[in-house]
Image (cartoon, helix red, strand yellow):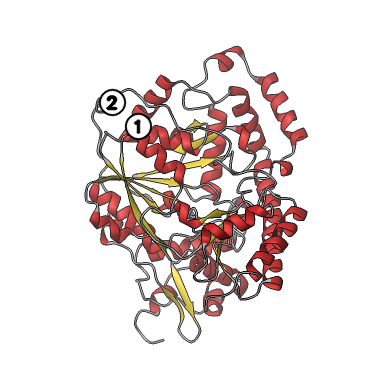
Amino acid sequence: MARGKAGFALDLPRPAALLDASAAGQGESKQEIVYATLREAILGRLIPAGGRLPASRALAQRWGLSRGTVELAYDRLCCEAYVSRTPGSGTRVSAVVPDRYLVAAAIAVPGPPPPRRPAAAPAAEGGAEPGVQVGVPFVARMADPTLFSLPAWSRHLAGALRGAGPELLCSADPRGVAALREQIADYLRKYRGIPCDAGDIVVLTGIRHALDLVARTLLRPGEKVCVEDPGYPAALRIFARAGAVVAPVPVGPEGFECAQLRRHPDARLVYVTPAHQSPVGVTMSATRRLELLDWADRSGGWIIEDDYDSEFNYLSAPLAALKSLDKARRVIYCGSFNKTLFAGLRVGFAVVPPQLREPLLALWQTTGRSVGVTEQLALASWLADGAFVRHLRSARRAYQERRDAILALLAAEAPGRYGVSGQHAGFHFVLWLPPGSDEAAFCARAAAIGLNLEGMGGRCREVVLPPAVIVGYTALTMAQARYGAQLLAGLLAATPPAG
């Protein structure tokens, strides 16, 4: 074999986990072991940027695996933008790893938090964004509550009440019930790649609650927060109400444009939705993720990772979280069962770095805790039973069927009249209208026939994007999805293409 970049991956020893025939039964499949081994080799620069991985057939023979197992691992690395696959050129590393990523930063021990002005009232913690509704095409960007088993939930609630003693009911840990935090940490380790334990978890009422607490814990009035543009309007309102200066940063094909942070040397905090950007739907590439972590390490800044719909990836397993790469512990990871089960549950959580935990909990206790102990105990029991993973599997299948039905009808009845992006994951996709279309007029015509569409322009702060609308489909029945798609296709077919 010729010497050079192509030799690096072939020199990797067979992972020890593959030598144990029982490894796949211990929570990791062979595909996951291959993926993790190659990802660590890329992050450690054992395989450098531009280096070529061996052919899947060659690696499969070397490691004693089926070629299909290696192909699935390569496809996942490609989806996460660690590698690119080009016919005739093979599989090459595309992620650029900053020098500083290879050296874990020292963790600064913070002094007492700075004096705060009186706390502003938190943003409304309703079940979903304003306008988002079950059964309404196409603002149904939320978990479908009809997929949730109420009889099973009732059994877990009853069991939680039977097993809870007076001390637990009246003096619960302010971080959340220990059993629930342990189950959340176990899930995040197995399915989101985050090395954490129960002590890292704080149970909250949802992602917006987490954003509010983090903003008021970290920020003095006038400090700067960089947000995605276009982005999530509720986050912007929360940061503004905490007294922050909100600076929009464009979202490109690889996600948040980290290079733009040079324009904001005074930024204290960055807020991103890397798994399925809200609303464009792109997945942040590995290179961008590492650049963002490098910025936080160098600047002493913080990152909020809003992982609101990562569980619903329709092409592959959900991508590993940004937090999974966070060696310097600068990422606050936020998740929510309201987004995966039903909106009225009001149980979310954050993975809080140790240096922020004490001041954040102090604020949480000052403003009053509102996550019910019985709901936490029931959810812990439900997670331990494996019901959460089973629910995600069935919900993912149902959402994909609804998405596919809509896309098939649009393709059949309005071919060539639109573009689509972000359809690989999440609760919505973006429908790009014919060039030159009037976005507001299109939404008005849709409203006249019973379709509720949100225009992309309303999510933009400084960037100017082509006309587009956001199509939410998860909380629709199949009949509603198909009927709405027929109406939408009719609108598109009646919209003349730009001359």
* Residue 435 location (% of width, % of height): 50, 71
Residue 201 shows in this picture: no
Mark carried by residue 116: 2
Question: Label 1 neighbourhood size at 10 Å, few (<14), some (14-19), many (20+)?
Answer: many
Residue where numbered disc 1 is placed: 216
Vertical order, 382 against 302 (above or below): above
**Are the residues flagged by discs 2 and 1 in contact, CB closer than 8 Å?**
yes
- Relative placement, left or right, of 67 versus 204 is right
Gap between marks 2 and 1 measured at Cα: 8 Å
Task: Please state the horizontal and vertical placement of residue 260, each as a whole percent of the image.
Answer: 29, 59
Where is residue 112 shown, x and y percent of the image?
25, 26
Relative image position of residue 100 (x, y in whole percent): 26, 57
| SS state under label 1 | helix
Q: Residue at x 60, y 64 (%)?
A: 315
Residue type at mark 1 is Arg
Of the numbered discs in the image, which one, if any, rests on residue 455? Answer: none
